[in-house]
């Protein structure tokens, strides 16, 4: 065990810091510290431009293999990049679904042709992706998707019809990865396909859904014979579930590091506020601030341990499984802590008609952390059944 | 001992519930969000017609002479429908403070009595701006405002002050920062008496808040129970999963146990509002805990639906988050309980469940020490 970074890594850190200092300024000054959890709808165009800027510096998709245009950065380097990015107040990454979910999935399961076609747009920070999994009747029971995909032999294209819901950033995305039923007689996770679908076409209708926050980050997406090329299915018809689950594995990987850094920034903001407004003198709040700090450290150490491969006793699986439950609950509590530190001001908005302050947005957003990406209840079921091997719950 | 409500009290509660069910639906609340005042004079008139603005005013001052125990169930009903109009603060705090002022300032007696008659009849509205709340809800609707300058109590006409509107996280609430200039003419009582009156007002305000939180909690739980029975995943109602059941069972337990605390505080306030600090603080903490747990768990049970503006649940959740901080937050009230408990003269023996007397359910002998905390 050696809990420090090598000389080369520290050099890398200096390089990242210098680049950010030289570039995250001027026209990008306004987006520093913005676009994080609960703030995704802010400065979208500026943040898209920033993605392109990052690409110019070679800072998008650094963890991807060099063969696919990434830097092949080591885990240590990715950790460092995320630390420095957060320290500099780097804006929420609008390209994160492409970089951390779609890209790695296409690299792992996609054809050469798909890789050539879709990866460069993600790398360049020009093409954004959304996740078309959930449907009105397929939330926790994701395998219950009803969206149909049928192959039209005349046009040699897939025709996709059905409805997705809660699709984050669909209105900002050029592409959506969609799970749809290729075998109309199938049920459950058999008979599904995983499609890479262009959003800008007649058969796709995106309608925003207003959230608790009064803003819209997610959408309903209707497919009415939306077209998808014969080559734009990842794997074979019937492989959809395998690919979809592979993708969720990436969700718990390196992408957690950037998230933890955002959390650190939020906690710092709360501590600074508590000192400013006197809340830090309240012993009960002090204890909760200390708890929040400890919880974040626990997540961080566990991620490092998991990512550095030190867990070789089969527990790796388990630590990946427990992560979502832990961070979601921690972050939900952090939201409450922020409101309590704000005190009376927690109720007062910044402006009419419904403009929330950053910590208020964060609070409301954290109400959803324990829901998306697998609810706390589903996570506990998974831990009990898959990690502990307990008897499965009866399913209807 | 009789720790129950009378038939009359229950009947009053039921008739208010029936009226509110007709008048205050989620759609009508949403309708208020887009109006300038956020206040519906029609609903207010209905409340006046049911006697709610008159009920706590003593009979000799033109009211119905009922008390906090009669009122607590009604405040709970207001919470259940998330009533936007400030009935609870108005009837329980402002008009009661007026009554106290009439009683302790003979120069004000005739004018105060006249004002109370108008309040009871619903032709005039009075609001009380307590220093514990930096913002005053629906201040723009009040014709007269009772305001504190240090410990003095002043009565100020609305056109004598400046209101600066503030947006609330809860779109039903209309908050204002109040700027005004105190004068000898507006002062009704001075420091010594004022401090006591403001303390009593705080107890009434926090009690009203607690009762509403209790109602908010129940309404959220009811919605989540229904949703969990209707919504299916994995081929069956989500409510058939233990994990979901337990989330809501925890809410039910928290609510039921908070009820006893809130009702006890109502009793204590009715017989000795100046000695009710500890009981009221306990009520505020317990009811807010129940409402916050319900907001959290009921949102969770609704899945992503619970995170939308369209789902009615946030009407109640946002009110709960606002009232959690109003009239003293959790920290403030826990401190009051600490102060009371740690006071060397506190009477904490087994025989003091309801105060200094173990023989009768008589709060008038509540330990004096409650009075010395502030
Ligand atoms: C902010 C946000 C962003 C999102 N972004 C996306 C996106 O980009 N793409 C996408 O595809 N989806 C997205 N989602 C959808 C998300 O994945 C689903 O909300 C989630 O899977 C839960 O499904 P549901 O909302 O239908 O809740 P339901 O599945 O209806 O669950 C309701 C309640 O029942 C419980 N429950 C259900 N089944 C069980 C069980 N078997 N045992 C115990 N408890 C159970 C749940 O825990 C929950 O409390 C997003 C959601 C949110 C809130």
Image (cartoon, coloured by chain):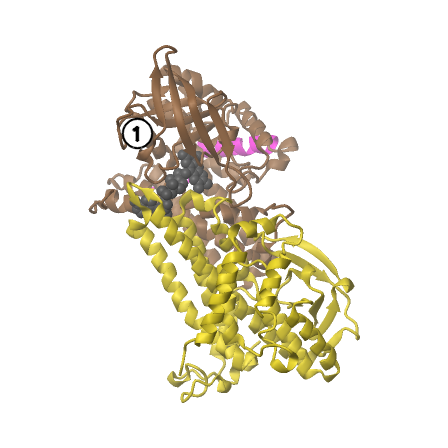
Chain colours: A brown, B yellow
Residue B6 to residue A88: above or below = below
Chain of the residue under label 1? A
**Side (left or right) of A244 relative to B80:** left
| Residue A355, picture quadrant | top right
Residue at image coords 59%, 63%: B46
**Side (left or right) of A366 relative to A188:** right
Near mark 1 (Cα within 10 A), the count class, few <14, some 14-19 or many ≥20, is: many
The answer to if A342 sits in the magenta stretch is: no
Quarter, ligand 1: top left
Residue at image coords 38%, 49%: B227
Residue at image coords 31%, 36%: A309
| Residue B253, picture quadrant | bottom left
| Residue B187, picture quadrant | bottom right
The quadrant the C terminus of chain A occupies is top left
Q: Which residues are magenta?
A: A1-23
The answer to if A18 sits in the magenta stretch is: yes
Residue beneath disc 1: A241
- Give the camera-side residue of A240 and B126: B126
Residue A215 to residue A349: above or below = above
The quadrant the N terminus of chain A occupies is top left
Where residue A256 sits in the image (x, y, percent)?
Answer: 42, 39
Residue at the limit of the structure toward the top, as seen here: A154
Determine the secondary structure under disc 1. Answer: helix
- Give the camera-side residue of A181 and B353: A181
**Side (left or right) of B341 relative to A21:** left
- Give the camera-side residue of A334 and B165: B165
Q: Looking at the magenta stretch, what is its main secondary structure?
A: helix
């Amino acid at each position: 065990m050696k809990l420090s970074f090598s000389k080369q890594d520290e050099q890398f850190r200096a390089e990242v810091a210098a680049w950010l200092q030289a570039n995250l300024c001027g026209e990008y000054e306004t987006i520093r510290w913005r676009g994080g959890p609960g703030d995704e709808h802010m400065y979208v165009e500026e943040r898209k431009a920033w993605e392109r800027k990052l690409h110019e510096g070679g800072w998008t998709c650094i963890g991807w293999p060099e063969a696919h245009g990434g830097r092949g950065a080591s885990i240590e380097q990715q950790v460092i990049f995320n630390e420095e990015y957060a320290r500099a107040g780097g804006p929420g990454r609008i390209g994160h679904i492409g970089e951390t979910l779609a890209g790695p999935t296409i690299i792992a399961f996609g054809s050469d042709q798909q890789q050539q076609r879709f990866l460069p747009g993600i790398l360049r920070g020009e093409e954004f992706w959304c996740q078309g999994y959930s449907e009105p009747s397929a939330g926790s029971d994701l395998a219950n998707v009803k969206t149909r995909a049928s192959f039209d032999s005349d046009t040699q294209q897939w025709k996709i019809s059905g409805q997705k819901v809660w699709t984050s950033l669909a209105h900002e995305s050029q592409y959506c990865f969609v799970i749809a039923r290729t075998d109309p007689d199938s049920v459950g996770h058999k008979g599904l396909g995983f499609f890479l679908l262009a959003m800008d076409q007649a058969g796709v209708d995106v309608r925003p859904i207003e959230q608790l926050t009064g803003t819209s980050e997610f959408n309903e997406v209707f497919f009415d014979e939306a077209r998808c090329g014969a080559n734009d299915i990842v794997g074979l018809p019937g492989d959809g579930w395998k690919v979809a689950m592979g993708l969720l594995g990436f969700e718990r990987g390196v992408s957690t590091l950037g998230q933890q850094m955002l959390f650190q920034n939020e906690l710092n903001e709360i501590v600074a506020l508590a000192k400013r407004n006197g809340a830090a003198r309240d012993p009960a709040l002090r204890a909760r601030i200390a708890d929040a700090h400890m919880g974040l450290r626990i997540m961080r150490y566990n991620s490092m341990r998991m990512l550095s491969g030190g867990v070789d006793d089969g527990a790796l699986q388990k630590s990946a499984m427990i992560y979502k439950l832990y961070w979601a609950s921690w972050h939900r509590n952090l939201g409450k802590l922020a409101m309590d530190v704000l005190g009376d001001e927690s109720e007062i908005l910044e402006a009419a008609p419904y403009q929330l302050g950053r910590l208020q947005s964060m609070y409301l957003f954290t109400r959803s952390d324990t829901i998306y990406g697998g609810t706390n209840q589903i996570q506990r079921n998974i831990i009990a059944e898959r990690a502990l091997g307990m008897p499965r719950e009866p399913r209807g | 001992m009789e720790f129950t409500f009378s038939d009359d009290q229950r009947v009053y509660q039921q008739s208010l519930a029936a009226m509110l069910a007709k008048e205050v639906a989620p759609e009508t609340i949403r309708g208020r969000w887009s109006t300038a005042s956020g206040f519906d004079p029609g609903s207010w008139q209905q409340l006046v017609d049911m006697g709610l603005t008159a009920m706590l005013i003593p009979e000799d001052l033109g009211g119905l002479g009922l008390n906090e125990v009669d009122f607590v169930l009604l405040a709970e009903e207001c919470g259940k429908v998330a009533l936007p109009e400030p009935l609870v603060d108005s009837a329980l705090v402002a008009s009661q403070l007026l009554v106290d002022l009439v009683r302790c300032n003979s120069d004000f007696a005739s004018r105060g009595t006249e004002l109370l008659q108008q309040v009871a009849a619903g032709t005039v509205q009075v609001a009380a701006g307590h220093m514990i709340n930096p913002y005053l809800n629906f201040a723009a609707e009040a014709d007269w405002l009772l305001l504190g300058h240090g410990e003095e109590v002043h009565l100020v006409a609305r056109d004598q002050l400046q209101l600066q509107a503030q947006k609330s996280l809860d779109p039903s609430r209309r908050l204002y920062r109040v700027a005004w200039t105190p004068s000898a003419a507006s002062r009704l009582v001075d420091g010594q008496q004022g401090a006591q009156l403001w303390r009593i007002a705080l107890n009434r305000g926090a009690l009203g808040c607690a009762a509403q939180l209790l109602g908010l909690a129940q309404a959220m739980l009811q919605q989540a129970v229904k949703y969990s029975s209707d919504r299916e995943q994995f081929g069956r109602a989500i409510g058939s999963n233990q994990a979901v059941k337990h989330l809501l069972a925890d809410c039910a337990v928290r609510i039921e146990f908070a009820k006893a605390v809130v009702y006890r505080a109502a009793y204590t306030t009715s017989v000795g509002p100046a000695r009710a600090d500890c009981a009221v603080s306990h009520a505020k903490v317990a009811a807010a805990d129940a409402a916050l747990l319900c907001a959290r768990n009921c949102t969770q049970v609704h899945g992503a639906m619970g995170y939308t503006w369209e789902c009615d649940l946030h009407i109640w959740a946002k009110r709960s988050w606002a009232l959690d901080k109003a009239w003293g937050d959790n920290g403030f009230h826990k401190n009051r309980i600490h102060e009371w408990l740690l006071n060397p003269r506190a009477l904490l023996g087994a025989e003091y469940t309801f105060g200094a007397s173990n023989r009768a359910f008589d709060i008038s002998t509540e330990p004096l020490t409650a009075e010395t905390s502030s």
